[in-house]
Amino acid sequence: MRNLTVLAVMAILILTSCKNDPKKEESEDIVEMEVQQDEDFRPNFHFTPQKNWMNDPNGMFYLNGIYHLYFQYYPDDNVWGPMHWGHATSKDMITWEEQEIALYPDEKGYIFSGSAVVDKNNTSGFGEDGKTPVVAIYTYHDAKAAEEGKDHQTQAIAYSLDEGMTWTKYEGNPVISNPGLTDFRDPKVTWDDVHKQWLMGLATTGETFFYSSQDLKNWEKLSEFGENTGAHDGVWECPDIFQMQVEGSDETKWVLIQNLNPGGYNGGSGTQYFVGDFDGKTFTPEKNMEALGEKHDFWIDFGRDNYAGVTWSNIPDDDGRKLFIGWMSNWMYAEKVPTETWRSAMTVARELKLIKEDDRYLVTSLPVEELKKYRGPGIAKNNIEVNNNKVVLNSSEVDLAKAEIRFSIPDLKETAYNFRLSNEAGEEFIVSYDHAQKEFVVDRSHSGQTNFSENFATERSTAPRISAGNELEVILIIDKTSIEMFFDNGKTVMTEIFFPNQPWTEFSFTTANQSFTVKDFEAFELNFPARTEEGNM
């Protein structure tokens, strides 16, 4: 956040330079007010671009101790425009350093979403002088061709010989031509070690196309998946496919993540998934997923603000985790949120796991362990009795603009359990769990600034409780303008953003009728390096 001294000096300079021009003075003051508001809303630890527009995470890979995060970026405005690939790096997926723009649009089109792989065996032939190539696979979007009604999305590649810092576009692009489809984009490539091939998932309007390659340049179409399966009330985008081991067993399954917009569980954008088998050519979902309709329970995140999420490639075998990050916004209102100099943040990085419960497979997610190293001294309380309203934490104990809260509620009854964030302006963000309905409900209608979009807070968000257990376990990750909620060890997850006019000052539990007990309550303030003027930590 900007230093107050710097703001004061800027204000003096503005007043001095504009003293003979009242209109200019007023305009400069408005700009400065916008910047201050933006910085008030800028997250403490979620990644944001220093300025202008960001959406989907792209090209994520790990190499030599560094996590790379590329992203859809428009450097000239705070709304969507001709897409570039922005770039950020991190040693732990928590604190990020923004780098120079990685890929720029050219005569072939905008640079839409895609992925990147470390070509360890130089199958592409791009490697030189012993340098391992990193290959990015992305979509070209030809805006002029789109206006003329022509095929306008093709797949292309670029390569880097300096571990992802600079890129050279392949002279033979595109590597996959358009087969006559309007939506044909977002290639996600992984090395399929079982079938010894590069495997690509590619999104079309309502299906995932699979392609294979031996050299990342020449691709063969394998199959299609998705017709009449899963949510289809929108365009399928940003797929991801990978193999996972079922927790506590030697069994392995394939997981297909498939984002779509609109058509998410709570409207707008969302991220569904399928579990099944892949024989090197065809993805076959589990029997209980074959006939999934629009409303189903297989979502990476049920909240409104986690979209286009995909996983990092090249995670070392001795780590073995499946690591994921998503765009923390929703296309219903992303271009209207009340920040002006920058727009959008990424979720906290998460670890995905595959579990089997009651003869069905579930993908769970929790914050990565690396977040714990930023914990300050904790506050622990046990056996908290809640009658009516019980404030259990205030901002003098733990800063609720950068907090981790954990607790459990045992012996669930057929009633509603509520917790809320509130501030001195009377604003509140409320989460309820109705055990009779087995449903979570989020109300952000009074959470601060909400009138920038009619889609932001008019409807409550809901999510099913997946677990059948009689004890509710909760993990909350709270930043200035977001909350990520992990219930029952990540079986149900919800991510929501908000824009309070004042910081949250209290965390409380409420109940309308029955009293209840909260166990194992812990709260930690998360402490991070101050952001630089460039927005890095």
Image: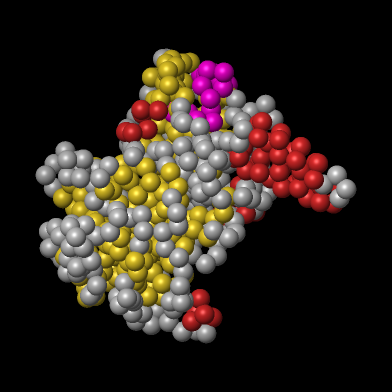
Quadrant assignment, res 101: bottom left
Relative side of 422 to 285, left or right = right
**Residue drawn 17% across the image and 63% down it:** 122
Quadrant assignment, res 296: bottom left
Which residue is farthest front?
A: 129
Relative side of 413 to 480, left or right = left
* Way the structure is coloured: secondary structure
Residue 212's spot in the image, x, y percent? 21, 70
Report the magenta residues as a range: 386-406
Of 102 and 225, nearer the camera is 102
Relative side of 339 to 85, left or right = right
Q: How many badges with numbers are in the image?
A: 0
The N terminus sits in image quarter = top right
Quadrant assignment, res 186: bottom left
Of 356 and 271, nearer the camera is 271
Residue 404 lies within the magenta run? yes
In the image, residue 383 sits, relative to residue 49, either above or below, namely: above
